[in-house]
Amino acid sequence: MDQMLTLDWIKTVGLGRPGAFLKKSLLVLDAFRLYRMDTIKSVLTQNRSDLTTILGGMTNLWQPFDVAASKPFKDAIQEKLNNWMRDGAHSHTSGGNMRTVMLTDITKRIAVVWEVFDPSMIKKRFLITCISNALESTEDEKVLLETGSDGEDVSTSDEEARDSNLYYTDSTAVTDSQIQAITEMLDADDK
């Protein structure tokens, strides 16, 4: 990623969203040094956007998509790949090496896993990290409704309450039983 690509992204995605010119906004990015360049900061400042960087090691707490979807999604895909290797549903080259997974198989698995994910998990995570909330604190009570007094997420599902192995314990992203259901769906597709 370079400076021109970053500026293009800011102009088309960050500033192209509905209401971008009417309200002040907050852009939360990781600590990649490119984002801290003066040209990037000045474009954001001119367009009434504040830039906040997430310190290294804190991504899992402050990047909602990473917490709510990316980790559990990657885990489900990795588990499926591990099952593929373990179950011997693959062929070998003449030299005895295992052939790689076909791109079409990977794409199919990704599509099935993505269909299972609930977008409300991502929306909830934005709310809990206070990134999508109104800047004037008018939505702070929503955070209190979604979290307990100690900041931990309040589970809204009986299944989640019974399942103690949540991915990212500070989020209601995906439980072990949900990962198992995804894996079973993928296995059924392979048959």
Image (cartoon, rainbow, N blue to C red):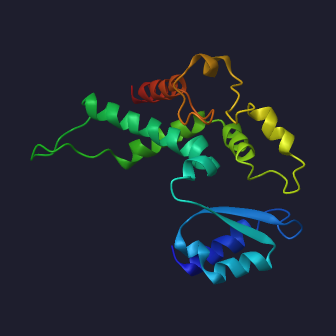
The one of 5 and 102 positioned closer to us in this rendering? 5
Image location (x, y in percent) of residue 8: 64, 76
Quarter of image, res 35 = bottom right
Image location (x, y in percent) of residue 73: 51, 40
62 lies left or right of 103 = right
Q: Residue at x 53, y 73 (%)?
A: 33
The one of 21 and 86 positioned closer to us in this rendering? 21
Total labels: the figure holds 0
Image location (x, y in percent) of residue 110: 49, 42
Q: Residue at x 45, y 30 (%)?
A: 186
Looking at the figure, which quarter contains the C terminus?
top left
Image location (x, y in percent) of residue 157: 68, 21
85 shown above or below 25: above
Q: Residue at x 55, y 27 (%)?
A: 175
185 lies left or right of 53 = left
The one of 155 and 21 positioned closer to us in this rendering? 155
The one of 8 and 149 positioned closer to us in this rendering? 149
Q: Is residue 89 visible?
A: no
Q: Residue at x 72, y 80 (%)?
A: 43
